Image (spheres, helix red, strand yellow):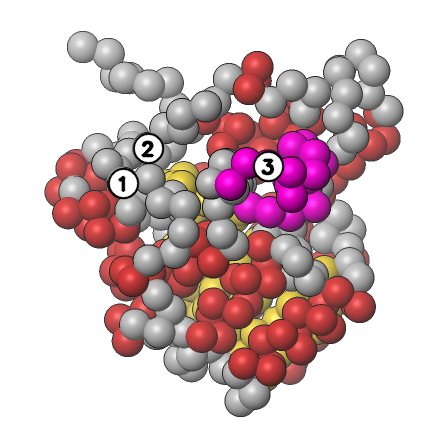
């Protein structure tokens, strides 16, 4: 299946322009929070990328301490000078989120970058055949967190902080491409609009929504089956691609994109920069709208 691509180049692997070691992308002196940061997740790669960019304070948030500790060990093995702390929280519960936000502020101070990489995919089934509790759990995790974030984390950020919501290609493609995933699709679309609301309500906050690519995670395996059996060079993208793309988004190089836009990590950033004038002139680009509107 061909994916929509704004740039001529469709990236599947990381590349020099988004290398976190570039001085222009430095995260030195920044405090970074990553949700969904358990071992083997996109969040793991994101935490590693920001540490590589020089972030000295990184908070890992997730439901399982064991997997968070493994991510912490991975990051600290490569970057022993980084302060990496683990905070166990259920992001669907406001009390749990509030407790984590408080402890992060006390131990690490105000935050500069928040990468929300947590998500939930219910069992694959039709609408009629779904277990209602499991079906609704996607909304509890994927959608409800926006309200918890605004209440508990938003007041604890520095000016011009960056919030990045990890989303899905499903928002831009027909439902027929993703059978038996109605709850996931609908919750991700809602999540994208809530990211827009965050941007509109908080003009000093830089907000981006990102499709990370097709990354080899447990969630991807739930949809595609055994990933080891996929043909070489198939759909999968490397985790470093979205992780490094997020580091780039958090840098001043991405300021021209403005807040509230939905981008794919597969899009080439050098081409985006080259088309800066076009992007700045069309505020409808990269948003969930009716294509072509206002109609001529």
In the image, residue 180 above or below residue 18: above
The magenta region covers 215-232
- Name the front one of labels 2 and 1: 1
- Name the front one of labels 2 and 3: 3
Q: Are marks 2 and 3 in contact (CB under 8 Å)?
A: no
Secondary structure beneath disc 3? loop
Q: Earlier in the sequence, mark 3 or mark 1?
A: 1
Residue 9: numbered disc: 1
Which quadrant of the rendered structure holds the C terminus? top left
Instruction: Tell me where residue 294 sits by quadrant.
Output: top left
In the image, residue 267 above or below residue 3: below
Residue 230: numbered disc: 3
Which residue is nearer to you in this view: 112 or 167?
Answer: 167
Q: Which residue is mark 2?
A: 5
Which quadrant of the rendered structure holds the N terminus? top left
Task: Tell me what residue is drawn at x 60 percent, y 63 percent.
Answer: 44
Residue 232: x and y in percent read 51, 41
Residue neighbourhood size for the residue with mark 3, other residues' Cα within 10 Å, grouped as few (<14), some (14–19), many (≥20):
few
Q: Earlier in the sequence, mark 2 or mark 3?
A: 2
Task: Tell me what residue is drawn at x 35 percent, y 74 percent.
Answer: 21
Residue 171: x and y in percent read 50, 28
Residue 46: x and y in percent read 52, 62
Task: Tell me what residue is drawn at x 45 percent, y 75 percent.
Answer: 52
Q: Are marks 2 and 1 in contact (CB under 8 Å)?
A: yes
């Amino acid at each position: 299946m061909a994916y929509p691509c704004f740039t001529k180049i469709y990236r599947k692997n990381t590349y020099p322009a988004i290398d976190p070691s570039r001085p222009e992308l430095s995260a030195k002196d920044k405090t970074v929070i990553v949700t969904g940061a358990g071992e083997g997740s996109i969040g793991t790669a994101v935490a590693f990328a920001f540490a590589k960019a020089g972030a000295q304070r990184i908070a890992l948030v997730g439901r399982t301490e064991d997997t968070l500790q493994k991510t912490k060990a991975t990051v600290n093995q490569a970057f022993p000078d980084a302060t990496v702390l683990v905070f166990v929280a259920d992001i669907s519960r406001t009390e749990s989120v509030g407790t984590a936000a408080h402890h992060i502020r006390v131990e690490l101070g105000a935050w500069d970058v928040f990468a929300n990489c947590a998500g939930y995919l219910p069992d694959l089934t039709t609408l009629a055949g779904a277990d209602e509790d499991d079906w609704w759990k996607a909304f509890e995790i994927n959608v409800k967190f926006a309200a918890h974030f605004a209440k508990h984390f938003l007041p604890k950020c520095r000016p011009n902080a960056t919030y990045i919501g990890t989303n899905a290609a499903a928002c831009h493609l027909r439902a027929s491409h993703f059978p038996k995933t109605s709850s996931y699709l609908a919750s991700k679309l809602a999540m994208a609009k809530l990211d827009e609301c965050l941007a509109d309500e908080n003009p000093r906050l830089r907000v981006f929504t990102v499709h990370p690519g097709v990354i080899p995670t447990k969630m991807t395996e739930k949809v595609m089956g055994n990933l080891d059996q996929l043909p070489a060079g198939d759909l999968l993208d490397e985790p470093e691609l979205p992780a490094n793309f997020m580091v780039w988004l958090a840098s001043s190089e991405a300021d021209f994109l403005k807040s509230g836009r939905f981008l794919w990590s597969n899009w080439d950033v050098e081409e985006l920069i080259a088309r800066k004038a076009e992007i700045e002139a069309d505020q409808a680009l990269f948003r969930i709208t009716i294509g072509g509107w206002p109609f001529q």
